[in-house]
Image (cartoon, rainbow, N blue to C red):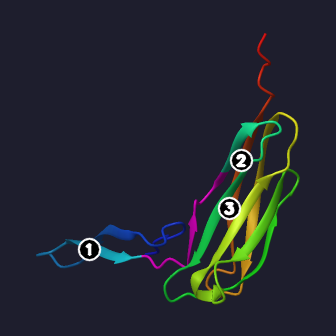
């Protein structure tokens, strides 16, 4: 039996299984497996949504923290297209492998419309060498001028 734990880091997990045996007194046994899934990384918020008016400065900060017992450094942070966002990655302190990073995502789109992108983070952690942060944006037109 395989239990998928993708995107379940830091959560408690309980799975129920039915085991069938050839024992006539106990032909079926209910098996319960419970545990906590180790989180390699905590990303907060897990997705970036940039919404505002054309001309407004729109940015969001994302905190990227290594999971307990899984120190890592970020080798690269890049947007898949990079067409409408700019990234700025800064360590939270000198011991980044433990404390983590602050990623600032800034909108560069000037005209009204929607966009989407995906930030790929490359790390030196063998258990989780890459992870991603989805980005969506909606830029509204300039507010109407009062008459």
User: What is the C-alpha distance between the residues marked 2 and 3?
Assistant: 10 Å
Q: Which residue is mark 1?
A: 31
Q: Is residue 65 left or right of residue 145?
A: left
Q: Residue at x 37, y 69 (%)?
A: 13
Q: Report x, y in % for residue 40.
A: 55, 79
What are the residue bounds of the magenta stretch? Answer: 37-48
Q: Where's the C terminus, which quadrant?
A: top right
Q: Report x, y in % for residue 83.
A: 88, 52
Comparing 7 with 62, the one in front is 62
Asked if disc 2 and disc 1 are in contact, CB closer than 8 Å, the reply is no
Q: Report x, y in % for residue 43.
A: 58, 67
User: What is the C-alpha distance between the residues marked 2 and 1?
Assistant: 42 Å
Asked if disc 2 and disc 3 are in contact, CB closer than 8 Å, the reply is no
Q: From the viewer's perspective, is residue 50 above or below residue 19? A: above
Q: Which quadrant of the structure image shows residue 47?
A: bottom right
Q: Nearer the viewer, mark 2 or mark 1?
A: 2
Residue 103 falls inside the magenta stretch:
no
Q: Which residue is mark 2?
A: 136
Comparing 60 with 79, the one in front is 60
Give the class, few, some or many, for how many residues have Cα within 10 Å of label 1's Cα (few <14, many ≥20): few
**Mark earlier in primary sequence (3, 1):** 1
Residue 133's disc number: 3
Comparing 6 with 48, the one in front is 48
Q: From the viewer's perspective, is residue 1 above or below residue 94? A: above
């Amino acid at each position: 039996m395989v239990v998928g734990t993708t995107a379940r880091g830091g959560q408690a997990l309980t799975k129920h299984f039915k085991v069938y045996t050839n024992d006539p007194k106990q032909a079926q046994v209910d098996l319960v497996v419970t545990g906590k899934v180790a989180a390699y990384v905590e990303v907060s918020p897990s997705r970036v949504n940039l919404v505002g008016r054309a001309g407004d400065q729109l940015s969001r900060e994302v905190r990227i923290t290594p999971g307990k017992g899984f120190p890592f450094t970020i080798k690269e942070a890049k947007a898949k297209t990079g067409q409408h966002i700019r990234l700025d990655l800064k360590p939270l302190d000198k011991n980044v492998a433990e404390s983590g990073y602050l990623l600032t995502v800034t909108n560069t789109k000037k005209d009204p419309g929607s966009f989407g992108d995906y930030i790929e983070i490359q790390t030196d952690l063998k258990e989780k060498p890459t992870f991603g942060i989805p980005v969506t944006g909606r830029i509204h037109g300039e507010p109407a001028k009062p008459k």
